[in-house]
Each structure stands twice: as C-alpha cells, then as structure tokens.
Image: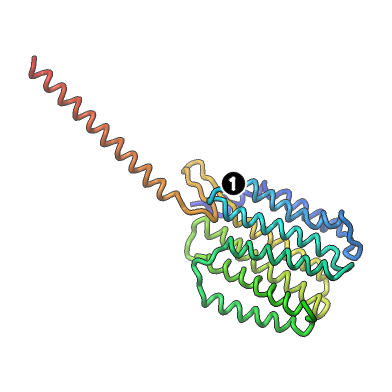
Amino acid sequence: MNSPVAVLKSVGPKLVPFFKTTCIYYILWLDADKPTLFSALIKCLPVLSLCVFVLLHGMSLSDMHTYARRILGGLVFSALGDAFLIWQHIDGIYFIYGMVMFAIAHVLYIVSFGFRPLRLPVGAALFGVAAGMYAVLYPGLHGVYSVLVGVYVLLLWLMLWRGMARLQMFSNDLWTWTKLCACVGALLFIISDTLLGVNKFRIPIPYNRALIMTTYYAAQLGIALSVADLKDPTSGDVTTCGAPDVTASSKEVYCSNNEDMFELKDMSAHSFSNGLCCAKKME
C-alpha cells in the first residue's frame, strides 16, 4: 500500500517549478491595473508548470492516459483564462473571454472525474447551495452576465459534485488520496471564484487579489495532483489515476502462468522418472 508520504516524496521534486513560479508571482506582485504581456506570463507560469508536472507523469494517446490528457487540457484552458483576465480592467470583453476559457476547463475536469458513481443525493444538496450562490450574485448581474454567470456557477458545482462522488472515504489505497486532492481542488476553485464574483458584482473584498489567487493556485495544484501515480520498485505495483486497476488481473495472470510452468515441470519430471524405470527393466 502506498502512503501519502511516499506519494509526496515521489511527486515533490516535480512540483518545485510550481512553487518557485508561485513565489515569483507574489514577490513581483505586478500592478493589476497596468496589464502587460510580462504580467500575463508571470500569472500563467504556475499553471503552466503544473502542465509540465502532468506531462512528466506520462502522456500518450492510450486509454490509460485519458484522465491525464483531460486534466492537462483543463490546465491549458485555465492558463488562457488567466491571460484574458489580466486585461479585464481595460475592456470588459476580456472578462467574458476568461469566463469562457475557464468554463471549458471545468467541462474537461468534469469529464475527467466521470459520472460513476452518480450519487444523486450529493448532487442535489450541492446544487441547492449553487442556487444560493447565484441568488447572492444575481442583484449585481446585468445583461449577458445574468446568463453567463448562471452557467458558470452550474459548472463549478457540477465539478465539485463529480469530485466528491469519486471519494471512497473508507478505503486507504492511493486512489483515495489522489481523488481527495481533486475534490479539495474543486472546492478551492469554488471558493476562489466566489470571492472573485462577490468582489466584482457585489461588494469589494479586502485583500481580494491575494485571497483569490492563493485559493486558485491551490485549487489547480490539487486537481493536478490527482494524476499522480507511484511505482513501487519493491512490489512491482503500479497505480495510475484515471486508468483501470490492472494490478490484480496482472497478478492473476502471473500466478496462472506460474502454475502452468509448475505443471509442465511436474510432467517433465514424471516422464523422466518413467523413462528411467523402463530403461532399468530392459536391462
């Protein structure tokens, strides 16, 4: 069984670029009212480093990496959304472009998490909270934002529902911890976007940029960590999130092959002993 500590030791070095670029973002803390290509790059670098993190865990067109490919796609569209939001103070259309990019990212995350098990009671409860969130924002929404924000809120909470539905709280395998990362990431995404929405459409929030970006980067980190896999060189076990668990079946095939080999060896030994007996009788 692979512990979270072992997972952390495995993925830790690959996360160094993320933490470095995040620190650079906070250290520079470029003026949000004066957007430039450089400030857009600095803002996007942490998410782009998570793209590299996902790629380092393996990427191919096989079904085994379908989950990772979708998460990677979500991170790429998130980075595009970050870039568009840099210019939201210059022209409001960039905020809409950013929303669309993040909406696509959420769809990719939702499809990654899947719809099995469904767990409708969890979804019903969360959509009730989503309705409350939209009701809070609605008085400040005008024109196209009334529809766009409603759809966006729906996608946010749909993502959390699918993240929570995958959890198996009474299981201690590696998949439980990586799924928990995805679930926490989805929750932090909701917190970040709720802060952003309230600050933009309702009332100003003190230290809003720091709060929004901290929860946002943590959210993307949690979702990216859900692709983490760990190879145990002592046991030969391989766990890859989003792919079918083939360990048990592989062991069965291995054992079956071993049994066949033992049977062949027994047959060979039996034939050899019979041959010796016949030779002795002929003498």
Farthest residue to the right: give it.
34
Question: Is 257 rendered above or below residue 192?
Answer: above
Q: Residue at x 68, y 74 (%)?
A: 151
Horizontal placement of 248 versus 166: left or right? left
Q: How is the image coloured?
A: rainbow
Count of numbered circles on the image = 1
Farthest residue to the top: give it.
283
- The residue closer to the viewer here, 108 or 175, is 108
Mark 1 surroundings within 10 Å by alpha-carbon count, few (fewer than 14), some (14 through 19), many (20 or more): few
Give x and y (percent) for residue 90.
Answer: 89, 67
Give x and y (percent) for residue 68.
Answer: 60, 53
Q: Residue at x 84, y 67 (%)?
A: 88
Give x and y (percent) for residue 116.
Answer: 50, 66
Name the residue that disc number 1 marks.
60
Q: Residue at x 41, y 46 (%)?
A: 250
Q: Residue at x 80, y 78 (%)?
A: 201
Quarter occupied by the C terminus: top left
In the rendered image, which quarter is residue 257 located in?
top left
Label 1 sits on what residue type? Ser
- Secondary element under disc 1, as helix, strand or loop, is loop
- The residue closer to the viewer here, 59 or 247, is 59
Horizontal placement of 281 versus 138: left or right? left
Horizontal placement of 64 versus 46: left or right? left
Give x and y (percent) for residue 275.
Answer: 16, 23
